[in-house]
Image (spheres, helix red, strand yellow):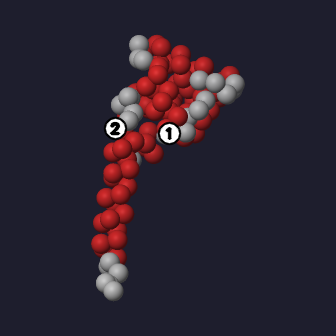
Amino acid sequence: MGTPPDKARRKELRDQYKRAEVEARVAGLPLSREQLTALVAFVDALVVEEGCDHTWRHTERWVSAQGLAWDPIEDALCELGGYCDCEVVMNCDPEDVFG
């Protein structure tokens, strides 16, 4: 039976895993950090002002105004847990997504 990895090795493995997780999320996201930051800020302001009707009404408005394709963004937001405007604000924080 082998000896358990030492503390430094466990930390190194954990850090590698976290980096790979972030890289996988970012690879599937058709938005840059700056775009996601702008999207979340836009949607947040409108959700605060108008509320969330549990659709992507505000999110789609931002995507359309940017001239971006909706389908890949919809898929990416779902992967991040953003199934409506309020969930985009709560679950798609660029700091969490991009690490």
Q: Is residue 6 left or right of residue 69?
A: left
Could you tell me if residue 34 is visible in this image?
A: no
> Residue 60 at x, y = what percent?
53, 19
Q: Which residue is mark 2?
A: 27
Could you tell me if residue 77 is visible in this image?
A: yes
Q: How many marks?
A: 2
**Sooner in the amino-acid sequence: mark 2 or mark 1:** 2
Mark 2 surroundings within 10 Å by alpha-carbon count, few (fewer than 14), some (14 through 19), many (20 or more)? few
* Residue at horizontal 61 percent and vertical 29 percent from the top: 84
* Residue at horizontal 41 percent and vertical 17 percent from the top: 68
Disc on res. 80: 1
Q: Amino acid at mark 1?
A: Leu
Mark 1 surroundings within 10 Å by alpha-carbon count, few (fewer than 14), some (14 through 19), many (20 or more)? some
Q: Amino acid at mark 2?
A: Ala
Quarter of the figure with residue 67? top left
> Residue 49 at x, y = what percent?
66, 24
